[in-house]
């Protein structure tokens, strides 16, 4: 009887720890405006490891948490590509990160990422957050979820968090281009006016 009680107690502790860890992982508040972003090293679709520190000449980054399977993310693919073409040469390249658990979303695996990038002609790195360690640090909850960071003497500082713009359904009906406005302000040495918006998209799958 004592052995049974011990086993039950052990299972309770293990399950409790797992539940706490899972909850902590998915409810981490993450970075706020003004925080310094820790660098990461993640695998790109070409097999190479990519970090922000690789971009010696960058002035900052447009970091996008996205995936293949979310209809919101798919709706924004062309606009994300447009952001990279518009700003990479000016010092603010796009870095896309796929944060989903591929056991939950198999169509977000590396092979599918490679196929999607080739099909769409992505000109930016498309990285996999293997082990799901990076997105909780940022506090990302959706795909897509955008972080504009500026390279400073202190490190890469968060300047904008949220949505790309105010209309995921129709790019031609957009009235407020939040990411463009943020990057343009930074390039002109000005403060970002709209620093945070609500990210609209699918929940990140854990």
Image: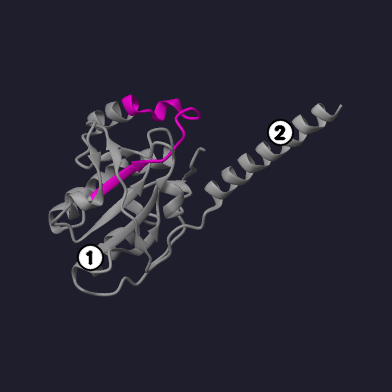
Q: Looking at the picture, how far across and down is residue 172, in whole percent?
A: 31, 50
**CB under 8 Å between callouts 2 and 1?**
no
**Front-most of residues 137 and 167:** 137
Residue 12, labelled with which disc? none
Residue that label 2 marks: 11
Neighbourhood count class around disc 2 (C-alpha, 10 Å): few under 14, some 14–19, many 20 upward: few
Q: Is residue 167 depicted above or below 97 in this figure?
A: below
**Taking the image as drawn, is residue 90 in sight?**
yes
In what element is the residue under mark 1? helix
State which tag comes first along the sequence, 2 or 1.
2
Residue at the image position 37 percent from the left and 38 percent from the top: 74
Side of 11 relative to 151 (left or right): right
Neighbourhood count class around disc 1 (C-alpha, 10 Å): few under 14, some 14–19, many 20 upward: some
Write the start and end of the magenta stretch as one range. 94-112
Q: Looking at the picture, how far across and down is residue 188, in whole percent?
A: 19, 71
Q: Looking at the picture, how far across and down is residue 153, in whole percent?
A: 23, 69
Residue at the image position 26 percent from the left and 63 percent from the top: 150
Q: Looking at the picture, how far across and down is residue 162, in whole percent?
A: 41, 57
Q: Is residue 143 depicted above or below 163 in this figure?
A: above
Look at the image and name its color scheme: one colour
Residue 107: say if magenta: yes
Q: CA distance from mark 2 to mark 1?
A: 54 Å
Residue that label 1 marks: 184
Residue at the image position 38 percent from the left and 65 percent from the top: 35
């Amino acid at each position: 009887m004592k052995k049974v009680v011990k086993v039950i107690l052990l299972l309770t502790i293990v399950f409790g720890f797992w539940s706490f860890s899972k909850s902590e992982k998915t409810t981490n508040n993450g970075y706020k405006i003004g925080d310094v972003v820790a660098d990461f090293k993640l695998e790109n679709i070409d097999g190479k490891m990519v970090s922000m520190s690789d971009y010696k000449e960058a002035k900052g980054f447009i970091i996008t948490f996205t995936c293949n399977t979310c209809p919101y993310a798919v709706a924004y693919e062309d606009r994300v590509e447009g952001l990279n073409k518009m700003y990479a040469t000016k010092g603010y390249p796009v870095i896309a990160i796929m944060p989903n658990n591929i056991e939950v979303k198999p169509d977000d695996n590396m092979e599918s990422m490679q196929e999607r990038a080739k099909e769409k002609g992505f000109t930016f790195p498309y990285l996999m957050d293997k082990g799901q360690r990076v997105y909780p640090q940022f506090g990302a909850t959706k795909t897509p979820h955008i972080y504009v960071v500026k390279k400073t003497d202190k490190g890469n500082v968060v300047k904008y968090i949220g949505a790309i713009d105010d209309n995921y359904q129709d790019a031609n009906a957009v009235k407020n281009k939040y990411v463009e406005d943020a990057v343009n302000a930074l390039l002109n040495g000005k403060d970002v006016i709209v620093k945070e918006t609500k990210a609209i998209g699918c929940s990140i799958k854990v």
